[in-house]
Amino acid sequence: MHTAALADYDKLINGGYDKKFKTYADAVVKSGKAVVNKFMYDKGNDYFTCDVTEVITCCKYCKYVNNPGNGECRWCGGSCGSWDTVCENPEVLCGEMPTSYENKTGPCSPDFSLRAGPEPADGYANAIYWKFRDDLLTNTGISEDSIKFTNVHHVSECAPTDKHCKDRSWDYNYPVLDGYDREDIIDPKDVVSEAYNNLKNISTDLDDVSEMIKNEMYEADTGDLVDSLALPILMIKGAVKQMSDIIDTVDDMEEEKRKNIILAFLFAIFFFLPIAGQIIGTVAALANFAHVIATIGVLGDIALDIQSIVEGKNNLPLAIFGIVLSPLALMDAAKIAKAVSTRREMTTEQVGKLGERVSKPLESIAKMKGGVCTRPGAFKRDLPFGAIPREFGFGMSPVNMRGYNLAVLAKARFL
């Protein structure tokens, strides 16, 4: 397992990563328009007031054709002209209902409390004049240089007439992307490279440990060795796999596929963090990841779950990697004991948040190891756990491995 994972990591570092980042950056850029719109229509009322163009008809007509309790007739008034209720009969011909459009100052989206009627399904029924502030930049992570203000028409046709085209489905003085491209996306490659550097010695150490076990020279508990290394190796493998699965173009990609690319990249970077000995708050390139997570909707919950594990106050993966990647840690029974103790602090829920590529193999390893050390007649150590024989005046001799089913561990292809 570890050999294949590290070999794939070599390929990623030697040219593969740059292509994957470009694909990720393009996906983020293509999601930028949706990010700006979502901010304006979800958060606009927290910061701004708007002038909203409302349709004005006489109150008698409005109350006849609408449900006044929903606020449709909030701004009604003026003359009904020749209209009366009888005009609604097909056989009766009446003059045109007088209709006007007036700007009313009030809350911005998503607050529709002072609009004439309920919230429209697409959010674009009225014409809105936005009074913009710098908050957009703070909430989207898109720099001011990549934004311009213009008038945006959200539909391709004018309704109800060309004369009143400007009064429906427009946003005036509205922010749109301008010159926003992949160069604006910060590259966290240093995290990936630093993680790679930290793993340079682990392959050799694992090979040495494997030989020691085969020759019955390994002094630590092999079951604990597996438990302490399973999570780190699966996270390495998962990070590289997520990155490798990213395709190389998003030109004509539908929105959902772009979101999955963004999730895969974030997933991998969050896995690389503890390998690199880092947390998000200390890596400048990750400063805008919260904004990127916001672009992928409900998939962002998955990213936030992973982030909560590798960023929380009790960052157990970071602690585990810090132990097992330290010099000669795999030969040190005390360090292995500490690593496995830390690993066992992780709850099933926490492990589950790391995804099935981690949780499922861990379940399989646990089943294959299950009961090996507690079966009747199993060998018991005659030293305190983690102790070295010479500390107690004993001569050095191979540790009896009868209590451990190495065939099972070999079958797991872990060592």
Image (tube, grey):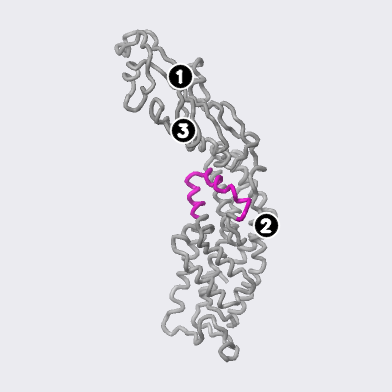
Location of mark 3 (residue): 109
Q: Taken as a whole, is the magenta stretch helix, strand or loop?
A: helix
Type of amino acid under label 1:
Glu
Asked whether disc 1 touches disc 3, contact meaning CB atoms under 8 Å apart, the reply is no
Examine the rendering and report whether any part of residue 411 can be seen: no
Is residue 228 shown in magenta?
Answer: no
Start-end of magenta stretch: 282-305
> Hey, which quadrant is residue 190 in on the image?
bottom right
Q: Quadrant of the C terminus?
A: bottom right
Residue at x 61% of width, y 46% of height: 24
Q: Position of residue 110 (x, y in %)?
A: 45, 34
Residue at x 65% of width, y 64% of height: 198
Report crowding for label 1: few under 14, some 14 to 19, many 20 or more residues within 10 A (C-alpha): few
> Hey, which quadrant is residue 276 in on the image?
bottom right
Report crowding for label 2: few under 14, some 14 to 19, many 20 or more residues within 10 A (C-alpha): some
Q: Earlier in the sequence, mark 1 or mark 3?
A: 1
Q: Position of residue 310 (x, y in %)?
A: 53, 58
Residue at x 56% of width, y 38% of height: 136
Q: Quadrant of the N terminus?
A: bottom right
Location of mark 2 (residue): 13
Labels 1, 2: front one: 1
Location of mark 1 (residue): 102
Q: Position of residue 20 (x, y in %)?
A: 63, 49
Is residue 290 shown in magenta?
Answer: yes
Q: Of helix, strand and loop, which one carries label 1?
A: strand
- In this view, the residue farthest toward the left is 86
Q: Of helix, strand and loop, which one carries label 2?
A: helix
Where 85 falls versus 234 (above or below)? Answer: above
Q: Earlier in the sequence, mark 1 or mark 2?
A: 2
Type of amino acid under label 3:
Ser
Q: Which mark is residue 125?
A: none
